[in-house]
Amino acid sequence: MPTTDFAPERRRMLTMLGTGAAVAGLGALAAATPANAAGSEDLTTASYGSTTGSVEDELAINRLLETYLFAVDTKDKTVFRTLFTDDATLIVLAHPDGTAGIVKSGIEAVVANLDGAAAWGYSTHVTANAYIRVTGRTATGDSHATAQLVYPATATAPETVVVRGIRYRDEYVKSLGVWKIRKRVFSPLWQYNGTAVPIAYPN
């Protein structure tokens, strides 16, 4: 007896049914979602007071962390100053657990600390990771970075590259819509030194 292969037709029917179910599901999701849920001021306000904060706040704080490292690498005091509150505290060379260290209090002392960057010729700081928690208009941050510092040659030592792992423990505050650092604890964690190799520029 002749036979008929229904497999292709069955596959087409199943595909159409599956597509229809997916479309129906998306329609139901859209109907269940408030009209103002995407990018609305209400949603931003509702999530702003949570311990995770809004996406906009976390992105702004991450940008703050990157700008700090840029200002250090370029030794730009003008930019550096804009990143801190007037009553900021900077604790440098703290132990890995965040204790001890040298305390710089007030914006002038904090900015003056950048003078220490004159000790090296070039540097590249790269932020590695950050754990940020936002609560209202304040936030805390715990981040790591890697610093590559090139120290000029001296009478007794060649040009040296210092590679250092750093941990920053921060407190932030949002004022007039801008996040700034109110307190930063800078802890070097590890370090190794090597001899710099000159770059062979073509001209």
Image (cartoon, rainbow, N blue to C red):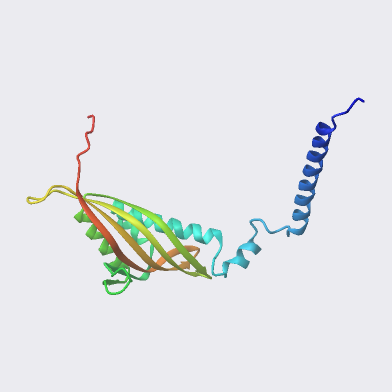
Which residue sits furthest left?
Answer: 155
Question: Depth check: 200 or 179 in front?
Answer: 200
Q: Is residue 20 above or below residue 109?
A: above
Q: For residue 107, which quarter of the picture? A: bottom left
Q: For residue 9, which quarter of the picture? A: top right
What x and y, as percent, mark residue 191? Answer: 25, 58
Residue plotted at (78% across, 39% down): 15
| Quarter that holds the N terminus | top right
In this rendering, position of residue 201 left or right of residue 27: left
Q: Is residue 149 above or below residue 4?
A: below
What x and y, as percent, mark residue 138? Answer: 48, 70
Q: Is residue 79 visible?
A: no
Question: Depth check: 142 or 109 in front?
Answer: 142
Q: Is residue 103 above or below residue 83?
A: below
Residue plotted at (80% across, 40% down): 14
What x and y, as percent, mark residue 200? Answer: 21, 34
In this rendering, position of residue 114 left or right of residue 159: right
Residue plotted at (23% across, 33% down): 201
Which residue sits furthest front?
Answer: 1
Residue plotted at (34% across, 61% down): 81
Which residue sits furthest bottom?
Answer: 100
In this rendering, position of residue 161 left or right of residue 97: left
In this rendering, position of residue 49 left or right of residue 9: left
What x and y, as percent, mark residue 175? Answer: 47, 67
Count all numbered tags in the image, as a single digit.
0
Q: Is residue 163 visible?
A: yes
Which residue sits furthest right?
Answer: 1
| Quarter that holds the C terminus | top left
